[in-house]
């Protein structure tokens, strides 16, 4: 195929800009990094095993999550969760190797007792606004820390953490 006149230089510049802007800072990278983190988090809580998190989170984040996962396990519980929806609202570079990603996520979760015969915990469904701080580690984006900006509980109806459980 032959490209004439000014089209070739414009195509070349466009391709170069795409490659430069696509070097780990695009929407697809943000979605991929957050989804991988969420999936590893689900596996880590379910199996009480943080090994999957090491590929998608920084050492500090893995240590923070280990404490939470260990707390569940020491209480004889495993968190069973399902990510039912994930939408990236924004992603913004916050440095050469840093990005902040805000998402809306829908989660369904409950505590499963490790001891046979004990009753399953209450099922919760929540729409959550999240903010993830990501860092570029070699070629992969990793979650350095995540924070919940807001949670709206859809199930059980009328549930509000402070109102219902004194938390």
Image (cartoon, rainbow, N blue to C red):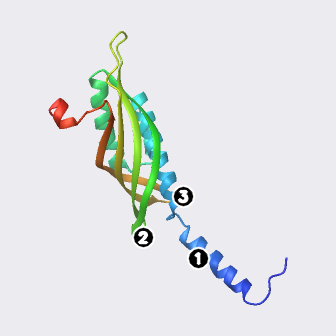
Percent x, y of residue 107 = 40, 38
User: Residue, x 42% and y 70% (percent of image)?
Assistant: 96
Disc 3 packing (10 Å; few <14; some 14–19; many ≥20)? few
First of labels 1, 3 by sequence position: 1
- Mark sitting earlier along the chain (1/2): 1
Percent position of residue 23, x then y: 54, 67
Q: Secondary structure at mark 2?
A: loop
Q: Label 2 belongs to which residue?
A: 96
Where residue 58 appears, x then y in whole percent?
A: 39, 51
Q: Secondary structure at mark 1?
A: helix
- Tell me the residue at 34%/50% (across/down): 129
Foreground of the two, 57 or 25: 25
In this picture, residue 8 sits left or right of residue 125: right
- In the picture as drawn, the residue positioned furthest to the top comes out as 117
* Alpha carbons under labels 1 and 3: distance apart: 16 Å
Q: Which residue is mark 3?
A: 28
**Which element type, helix, strand or loop, lies under badge 3?**
helix
Q: Position of residue 71 (x, y in %)?
A: 27, 30
Q: Is residue 131 visible?
A: yes
Give the side of residue 11 with respect to residue 18, left or right.
Answer: right
Q: Residue furthest left?
A: 166
Quick one: which residue is furthest to the front in this view? Answer: 157
Residues tagged 1 and 2 counted as in contact (Cβ below 8 A): no
Which is more toward the observer, 33 or 124?
124
Looking at the image, residue 152 lies above or below residue 108: below
Q: What residue is disc 1 on?
A: 17
Q: Residue furthest bottom?
A: 5
């Amino acid at each position: 195929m032959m490209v004439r006149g000014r089209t070739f230089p414009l195509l070349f510049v466009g391709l170069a800009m795409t490659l430069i802007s696509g070097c780990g800072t695009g929407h697809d990278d943000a979605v991929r990094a957050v989804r991988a983190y969420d999936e590893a988090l689900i596996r880590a809580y379910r199996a009480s095993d943080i090994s999957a998190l090491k590929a998608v989170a920084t050492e500090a984040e893995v240590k923070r999550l280990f404490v939470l996962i260990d707390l569940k396990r020491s209480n004889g519980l495993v968190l069973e969760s399902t990510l039912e929806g994930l939408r990236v609202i924004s992603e913004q570079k916050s440095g050469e190797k840093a990005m902040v990603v805000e998402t809306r996520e829908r989660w369904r979760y409950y505590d499963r007792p490790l001891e046979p015969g004990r009753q399953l915990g209450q099922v919760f469904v929540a729409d959550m606004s999240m903010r993830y701080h990501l860092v570029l580690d070699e070629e992969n984006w990793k979650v350095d820390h995540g924070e919940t900006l807001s949670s709206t509980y859809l199930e059980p109806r009328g549930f509000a953490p402070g109102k219902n459980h004194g938390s």
